[in-house]
Amino acid sequence: MTTLTPGTGTSAEAHAIGVDAATAIATTLKALADPLRLRMLSFISTSPSGEACVCDIAEVADVSQPTVSHHLRVLRDVGVVLSERRGTWVWYRVSPDFRGTVSTLLESFAPAALEAGRGAHELTGLDDVDATLDRVAAELAGAHPGLRADVVQRTVRESYAALARRAGVRAHLVATTERFARQRLADIERAQRAGSADALSVHGPAERAPHVPQVLFVCVANAGRSQLAAALLQRYAGDRVVVRSAGSTPAGAVHGTVRATLEEIAGPDAAGTAFPKPLTDDAVRAADVVVTMGCGDVCPVLPGVRYEDWVVGDPALASPAGVRAIRDEIDQRVRGLLAEILPEEP
């Protein structure tokens, strides 16, 4: 007998994953559900070359090579990793079919699971969100008279929806929405000014204000690497550079392992001002340099924009010493970038 879902007239089976699919997925999840395998997978996926040798994994995991081989074989049997023998060693890399899944697991799901275990996410709601967003839009329209009111209102509402949907509805969501919308509106204005200047140049030289370069850092969760890079560049450059950061799949909050380091870089208010944001076309259009950090090929490629990819470790699940090492590597790269975009500055 087929059970109907009350009030719908459809069978309950239509709302559940199929038995065969559930069995296959559960097999993969079971292979992943081991602390040592997760550490190994993290090490492989964040390796600069995208692969790792059994000998290196054994050293990091602090277990024997036969134990490493056993656990990696489990991951290989479900298709998560691929192996290749070169000489006397076997090298492992994440399967292309699982690359996006592994990134989401390690950089979004895993930190969220840790934070949830600490009781870090409190959900709050708004009694009248429309009126509240209208008030925010009215205030921002006054600060951006060059933009149409409907553009400002749409940007505010899109910002609220993106943060609530992707990052989870949290306390201070309205204040976070206002900060995000303010950034986006500034980026829209910047892109429009650049377009106007290009149009003017066709008819002759136009008087232009000194150009302030804008850099956008993008990672998967916008809760670790990209936040550290943005904070470091802002610290060194001040108002000489406009700095943005975003995530292809933003997390609910900055990773707990990163917060203390962010506060060291940007001061005690960093935790309140550094919040994960979704990647938008506005930010890419306004940027002179886009730096991707482990998020793959997610940014739209626009003419006139310089793109770089920095392969650095993920601090989401790193030890305090690991976070410091990642911060130091990003610091070196940021200093090099700053020397290139502001070559005449001290």
Image (tube, rainbow, N blue to C red):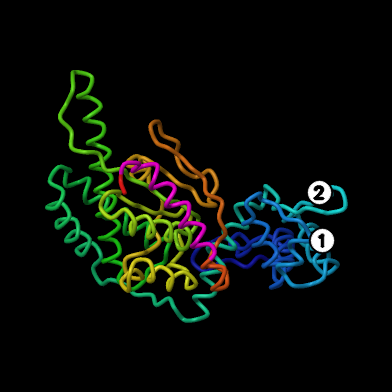
Mark 2 is surrounded, within 10 Å at the Cα level, by few (under 14), some (14 to 19) or many (20 or more) other residues, namely few
Q: CA distance from mark 2 to mark 1?
A: 12 Å
Q: Quadrant of residue 18?
A: bottom right
Question: Looking at the rendered structure, which numbered label has been put on residue 73?
Answer: 1
Q: Which residues are magenta?
A: 325-344
Residue 84, label in figure: 2
Image quarter (top left, top right, bottom left or bottom right) of the N terminus: bottom right
Residue sticking out furthest to the bottom: 118
Judge depth for marks 2 and 1 and give the one in front.
2
- Residue type beneath disc 1: Arg
**Element on which disc 2 rests:** strand
Residue 203: image x %, image y %?
A: 19, 18
Q: Residues within 10 Å of mark 1 (few under 14, many from 20)?
A: some
- Magenta segment's dominant SS is helix
The structure residue drawn at horizontal position 46% and vertical position 40%, both measured from the top left corner, is 307
- Left or right: residue 32 versus residue 248 is right
Of labels 2 and 1, earlier in sequence is 1
